[in-house]
Structures are given as structure tokens and as C-alpha cells.
Amino acid sequence: MGDIAHKILSGQRIDEDDGLNILKHFSTLKIGQFASLVKRRQGIDDEATFVVDTNPNYTNICDTECLFCAFWRTNDAQDSYTLSPDKLIEIAKTSYHNGATTMLLQGGHNPSIKLEYYCDLIKGIIKEVPNIHLHAFSATEIYSIAKYSSMTTKELLSLFWELGLRTIPGGGAEILSNKVRKKISPLKISADDWMRITEEAHRIGFKTTATMMFGHMETDEDILEHLSRIRNLQDATHGFLSFIPWTFKPENTFMERNIKNEIGGDRYLRVLGLSRIFLDNFRHIQGSWFTQGFKVGGMSLHYGANDIGGTLLQENVLKSANNPHKASIDDIVYFIKSEGFVPIQRNTFYEPIKTY
């Protein structure tokens, strides 16, 4: 462990074996100390950023039927829905007037939705609400939309770029281990396809985020495979804006019968801290007040996080799993200050808008 500590202290890159040793053997406090050191070395001192955003979901109809998801519905379910482009434009306008600068837009893999719908949606929001940034369609959605439209994913991404879309959320990554994905989302794209589509997006010019959902059936080795995959791609493309890890919420999912409780704050902070140490080519690591609550969310700023995500004026996916956490801008500003950091509102590209 002394060799690993020397690597971290001297600014050397750690490898997967080092990361595994950190996760298995370092104390939680030591991981936090090293993560804070690495963050400071990247020139990130006492600032903590957040974004004012909204996260509507355009449909909950999904033929992927992931076992970890409480949100999806079949087409004939009584509470299934698909929002019209006009309704989503209305939501964008309302959200903008309430202070949102970003609209994070995702939905289920709905084979009934035609390509024209997505094109009208992108064009409509950009035209009608030009001051809100549309951050839309994860790699898994890109795969499904392309499949149902008889296009390649590269062709679809190029079309969306021409229509004005510029950033893509990192959803659908879950754990980038094919072994795990076959257990928790057997109908979803493979880890290799997620990586391929994300690289295609980066090569076209899109900026994306990278995410990780953990605390279910993954091992420490799977977590390191995930982190290694995205670090390698970041080396190649520099297309990731940030890394956003969060924990599995079992309530109302098929996996709830085997996993009754979500993991605790200690495990979350250990993985978060490791992420800051391992992902030496990511400037922005996001802690999550939304999934963890303000107590652990606040501690995340001491474990390598320099961003705490968004206000999520509207959110449905984790709400379906009975996630209870909500916050206003004032709440977020207060809790960042209470941890000894300076709150900075940012945009989708992590550029500062306002310091509080």
C-alpha cells in the first residue's frame, strides 16, 4: 500500500490493481484524504458547482425492461405515457422561467416513437426556448432510436448534431461490465456498444457525461473495469465533461426481492473517492445530494466531488423508486456553504454562471 500512496502523492497514474487495493484495503478516511489531495492538485480548491435543471421523461414505455428500473412500463400499461413535443416545449418554457438553464431529457426505449418525433423535439426546443440547453438522449436511447429508424448510430448522431444537439447524458452505462449487464439488464446494449456509441458521439463533436450505477450485483473488480474503460476513452477523445456515480435504489424494482436495502454512505464515499483518484483525466466528479441526501451529499465534497448536480425541477425515474430527496436553489446554496465551500451555479458545460 505504500507504493500506491507514493504514486498518488507524486502524481503518478494508478492502475486497476492499485485501484482494487484502495477499494479493498484503504480506510474510508484515507481514501477521502487522498481524493481531496488529488482534487486540490487539479486546481480545485473550495468551489462547489451545481446546475439549475429540469429532467422530464418523454416516455415511460420501454422494451428493454431492466430489472433495476422502477420507471419503465409496457405499452398497454394503464399508467404508460408518451409526451408530445408541444408538451415538452411547454415544460422547457416553464422550467426556463423558473430559472433552469439545462433540460436533461431522457426516456424509455419506445419502438412506437418515430424519428420525426425526436427531430421535431430537438428543433422545437432549440427554436422556442433558445436560452435553455438541451442535454438529451443517452447512448442506449441512441441505439434504440437508430434501430427503430433503420439507421446506424453514427448516422443518427450526425443528424442530431445537424439539428443543433450538442451534449448527451451518460445514462445507460450502469456498470460497464458485460457480465453484470447480462444479470441486471439482459435486453440492454452491451458495455462495448455503450462505449462505441459514446466514442462516435465524441468524434462528431458532442460532449457527454459518464455515469455509473452501483450497489447491486457488481464486484469491486467490475467497478474498476468500468472506471478503466471510461478513463481510456477520455484519454482518446477528451469528450467527457464529468463523471457521475450514484447508487441503486431497489424499491419497486424486480431486483428488490433479492436486494432489500441500498448501500450505505460509507460505501458510496469510498467509491466516489476512488473515482477522483483513478480518473485523473476528469476534472469534474459529481457528488449526489439527490440520491444520498444532504448529509452524505455534503460529505462527498470532502471525498473528491467538486459538483453536486442539479436542482432537478422535475424528475421521474428515481421518484418511481420512492427517492425522497428534493431541494431548492436556496437549499443547495446553504448546504454547500455549510460544508465550507463556495457555491457556484454553472451551465451544462461546467462554465460558471453565478457565485453565491
Image (tube, rainbow, N blue to C red):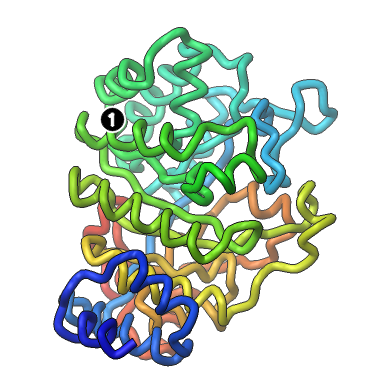
Report the front residue among 71 and 218. 218
Q: Is residue 323 above or below residue 91?
A: below
340 w.r.t. 72: above or below: below
Please count the marks in the image: 1
Side of 133 where 331 appears, left or right: right
Residue 191 location (% of width, % of height): 46, 40
In the rendered view, does 98 fall on the left or right side of 316?
left
Residue projecting furthest to the top: 150
Q: Is residue 265 visible?
A: yes
Q: Position of residue 351 (x, y in %)?
A: 22, 58
| Horizontal side, residue 99 vs residue 79: left or right | left
Residue beneath label 1, please?
200
The x and y percentages for residue 199 are: 28, 36
Near-viewer residue (61 or 34): 34
Quadrant of the image occupied by residue 64: top right
Please determine whether, in this image, residue 17 is positioned above or below residue 22.
Answer: above
Locate the C terminus and report the quarter of the image it occupies: bottom left
**Residue 295 position by quadrant:** bottom right
Residue 32, x across and y down, in percent: 39, 85
Where does the N terminus fall, quadrant-wise?
bottom left
Residue depicted at 39% across the width and 47% down the height: 102
Residue at 66% in and 45% down: 184
Structural crowding at the residue carrying mark 1, measured as other residues with C-alpha within 10 Å and reported as few (<14), some (14–19) or many (≥20) = some
Depth check: 95 or 17 in front?
A: 17
Is 14 situated above or below 340? above
> Residue at horizontal 33%, vertical 69%?
49
Which amino acid type is shown beneath numbered disc 1?
Glu
5 sits left or right of 111 in the view: left
**Residue found 72% across the figure and 50% down from its top:** 320
Considering the numbered disc 1 on the image, is that residue within a helix, a strand or a loop? helix
Can residue 93 be seen here? The reply is: no
